């Protein structure tokens, strides 16, 4: 049985004042059935993990370097994130692929470093609108899956997030049939590569304009084990109903 996961990606948002949102979330979901994850900006990670210690929320980072340490000004290693309180790291988000020219091989190298340090990885993938319109979605996802995920994963330390780029922050959401097709495809490809036991334990998240109003419909889709949420994870009042919908699914 896969434990559902509600993951919030705060991106480059949040200062100390926003730690109150994490406290509110922790208080509201003490008995949550689903796993709740917040990936705040790195500057807040340590304090957030400290404030919410022993509560229902786990914490993650939004990127890590592929090397263990060294002369990489401005970068942060996987071990540093673990030390700051992270148990997960989001890798290969489309904004990092676009803004930092990250390719599948970079994501894979970072994932290897994160796993070696003891972090769990959430590896993101998704197609551009033009790729969907050209009917290339499954080819794109197949390539990203093969290229971004390292070989030595387990069902526990890998989460895959399907995030169509055209749905991120736009208010546009794929149809139930479109989400279902991609999630079934990802599960089948994972089975081919890692075998049924590991593949069936890997959680598959949908991401892209998940809101309190559409969460229940998305969570009812087979092979959707939760969500990676951007904008609607910033305020406890918005994220809470999404967590409740996941608990109820
Ligand atoms: C994201 O950036 O991972 C995301 C899904 O953003 P939003 O929920 O705002 O579309």
Image (tube, rainbow, N blue to C red):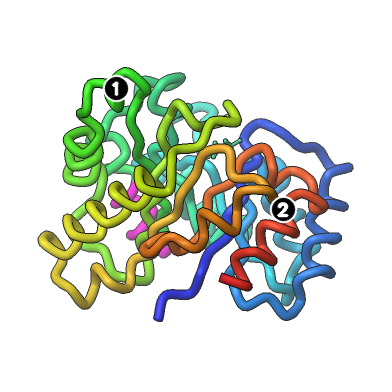
Q: Which residue is mark 2?
A: 239
Residue at x 37%, y 71% (from the top left corner): 156
The residues colored magenta run: 111-118
- Up-down: is 179 above or below 166? below
Nearer to me, 64 or 150: 150
Q: Which residue is mark 1?
A: 133
From the top left corner, tell me how far across and down residue 161 is, in percent: 41, 49
Separation of disc 1 and disc 2 at Cα?
31 Å
Residue 206 appears in the figure: yes
Q: Quadrant of residue 108?
A: top left
Along the horizontal axis of the image, is 244 left or right of 129? right
Ligand 1 falls in which quarter? top right
Q: Is residue 168 magenta?
A: no
Marks 1 and 2 in Cβ contact (< 8 Å): no
From the top left corner, tell me how far across and down residue 212 is, in percent: 69, 50
* SS class, disc 2: helix
Q: Nearer the viewer, mark 1 or mark 2?
A: 1
């Amino acid at each position: 049985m896969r434990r559902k996961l509600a993951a919030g990606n705060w991106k480059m948002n949040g200062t100390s004042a926003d730690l109150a949102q994490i406290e509110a979330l922790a208080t509201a979901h003490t008995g949550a059935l689903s796993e709740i994850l917040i990936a705040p900006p790195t500057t807040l990670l340590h304090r957030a993990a400290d404030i919410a210690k022993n509560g229902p929320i786990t914490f993650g980072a939004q990127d890590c370097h592929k090397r263990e340490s060294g002369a990489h000004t401005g970068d942060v290693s996987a071990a540093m994130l673990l030390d700051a309180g992270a148990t997960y790291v989001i890798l290969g988000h489309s904004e990092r692929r676009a803004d930092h020219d990250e390719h599948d091989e970079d994501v894979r190298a970072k994932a290897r470093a994160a796993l070696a340090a003891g972090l769990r990885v959430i590896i993101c993938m998704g197609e551009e609108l033009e790729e969907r319109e050209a009917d290339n979605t499954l080819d794109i996802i197949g390539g990203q899956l093969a290229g971004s995920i390292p070989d030595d994963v387990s069902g526990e330390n890998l989460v895959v997030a399907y995030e169509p780029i055209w749905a991120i922050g736009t208010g546009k959401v794929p149809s139930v049939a479109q989400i279902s097709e991609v999630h079934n495809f990802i599960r089948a490809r994972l089975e081919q590569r890692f075998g049924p036991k590991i593949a069936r334990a890997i959680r598959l998240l949908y991401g892209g304009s998940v809101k309190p109003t559409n969460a229940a419909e998305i969570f009812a889709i087979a092979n959707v084990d939760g969500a990676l949420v951007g904008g609607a994870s910033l305020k406890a009042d918005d994220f809470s109903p999404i967590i409740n919908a996941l608990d109820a699914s």
